[in-house]
């Protein structure tokens, strides 16, 4: 087998699992069983291809005599990866059509090799047909997303986010109490969050984006506090809360399978909490029962585009509006559950105005203290363009 063919074949297969099978890119890339250099190449190709998928599909459609629907899905995925390499990659020009042809043959479509070879070479000769001029098209974002971000934060901020969200995310981590940061770890602007200059995750470190660490920092839970986390699965923030030694910790989620997975995660780490399956919009608790409540609400997830680029393909303006209504109901329930003098923190890993400011502005929310980001009247906006983190909105409600 020619060098590089296996990596590109694997990448094409993973792209298909994400695009047609509904898998998450950040999960499928963990399954790669290849030598380190090939595994890095696969991750680069998978993320890059999905980030640019609408743009790549337009180019394939414009250069092909066949409609996209008439191209076998396996062959289309091979073409997508190859087109990404031509337009955005660093691979030597002669290697791209050769490895694409061999990839098509390896996935069982030897008869399509001439078709694949012709399209890739046509792209190399003529460049991208009809290159986009609109920022939404250039970054393969739905138009409504760019419109929303521009209205919410201004054109410059929207463009800066779109560009930063088009890059790979650094691996950040935190250490548990008693475990000092390892030699070479670099502290971020978020207390307790670190990165390693070579992207390594040290032993005993817990991988967690710095924005998620910031959410728990804003909650300010500690000894003696009765804490409730709503929308707790998959449990990363739950463990971070537990590490602050609260008197009690109740974690609520509506999905049974995710609860089981999160509970096992907490138990393996030596933590303990009461896991309850319940609707965050109808909490089964009496008023004023908790000292701290974290509402980690379901959202459109656009702040995670660096890690889950397929979000651009899966969310709609209808999702945004439906989720914003749910978020308001969840926040109202959380406020009722906290005692006078307690604190509620509302967080969403997205940037749409409907899910951020419009949820918090009528609830007396404010930005958390001593955290980096864009400080607003009713919350704090973090993002890859602002803080080098995932996109996150955090609002603190002191009762």
Image (cartoon, helix red, strand yellow):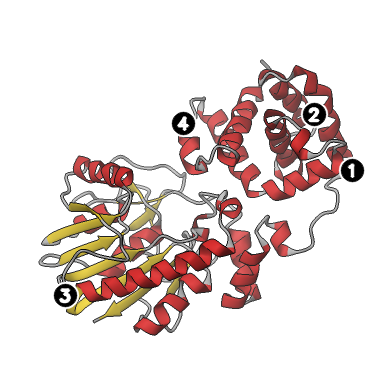
Image coordinates for residue 372, horizontal then vertical, percent: 42, 71
Q: Earlier in the sequence, mark 3 or mark 4?
A: 4
Contact between marks 1 and 3 (CB within 8 A): the answer is: no
Q: CA distance from mark 3 to mark 4?
A: 45 Å
Q: In the shown orientation, is residue 251 left or right of residue 245?
A: right
Return the disc, 1 or 3, that comes first in the chain's sequence. Answer: 1
Between disc 3 and disc 4, the foreground one is 3
**Mark 3 crowd level (few <14, some 14–19, many ≥20, 10 Å Cα):** some
**Element marked by disc 4:** helix
- Residue 89 or residue 129, whichever sits in front: 129
For marks 3 and 2, give the CA distance: 64 Å
Q: CA distance from mark 2 to mark 4?
A: 27 Å
Residue under label 1, please give it: 126
Dot 1 falls on a residue whose secondary structure is helix
- Dot 3 falls on a residue whose secondary structure is loop
- Give percent across and percent down for residue 229: 26, 61
Q: Earlier in the sequence, mark 4 or mark 1?
A: 4
**Pointer 2 residue:** 116
> Residue at (59%, 43%) from the top-left corner?
47
Residue placed under numbered mark 3 in the picture: 288
Disc 4 residue crowd, few under 14, some 14–19, many 20+, Cα 10 Å: few
Where residue 165 appears, as percent x and y from the top left, is 57, 57
Name the residue carrying label 4.
31
């Amino acid at each position: 087998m020619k060098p590089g063919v296996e990596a590109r074949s694997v990448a094409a297969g993973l792209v298909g699992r994400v695009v047609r099978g509904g898998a998450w890119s950040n999960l499928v890339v963990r399954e790669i069983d290849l030598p380190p250099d090939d595994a890095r190449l696969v991750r680069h190709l998978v993320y890059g291809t999905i980030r640019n998928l609408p743009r790549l599909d337009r180019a394939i459609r414009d250069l092909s005599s066949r409609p996209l629907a008439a191209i076998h899905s396996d062959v289309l995925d091979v073409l997508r990866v190859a087109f990404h390499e031509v337009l955005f990659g660093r691979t030597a020009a002669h290697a791209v059509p050769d490895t694409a042809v061999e990839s098509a043959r390896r996935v069982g479509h030897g008869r399509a090799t001439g078709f694949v070879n012709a399209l890739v070479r046509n792209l190399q000769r003529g460049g991208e047909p009809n290159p986009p001029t609109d920022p939404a098209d250039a970054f393969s974002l739905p138009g409504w997303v760019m419109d929303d971000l521009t209205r919410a934060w201004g054109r410059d901020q929207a463009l800066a986010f779109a560009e930063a969200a088009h890059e790979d995310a650094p691996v950040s981590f935190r250490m548990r109490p008693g475990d000092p940061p390892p030699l070479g770890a670099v502290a971020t602007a978020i207390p307790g969050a670190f990165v390693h200059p070579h992207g390594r995750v040290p032993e005993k470190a817990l991988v967690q984006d710095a924005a998620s660490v910031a959410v728990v920092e804003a909650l300010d839970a500690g000894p003696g506090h009765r804490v409730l986390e709503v929308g707790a699965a998959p449990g990363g923030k739950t463990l971070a809360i537990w590490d602050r030694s609260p008197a009690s910790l109740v974690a609520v989620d509506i999905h049974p399978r995710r609860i089981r997975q999160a509970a096992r995660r907490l138990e393996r780490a030596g933590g303990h909490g009461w896991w309850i399956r319940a609707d965050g919009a109808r909490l089964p608790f009496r008023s004023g029962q908790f000292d701290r409540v974290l509402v980690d609400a379901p959202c459109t997830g656009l702040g995670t585009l660096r890690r889950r680029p397929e979000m651009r393909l899966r969310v709609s303006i209808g999702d945004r509006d439906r989720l914003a209504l749910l978020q308001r109901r969840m926040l109202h329930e959380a406020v009722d559950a906290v005692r006078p003098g307690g604190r509620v923190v509302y967080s969403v890993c997205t940037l749409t105005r409907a899910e951020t400011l419009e949820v918090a502005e009528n609830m007396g929310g404010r930005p958390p203290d001593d955290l980096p980001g864009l400080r607003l009247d009713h919350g704090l906006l973090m993002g890859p363009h602002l803080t080098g983190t995932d996109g996150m909105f955090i609002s603190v409600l002191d009762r």
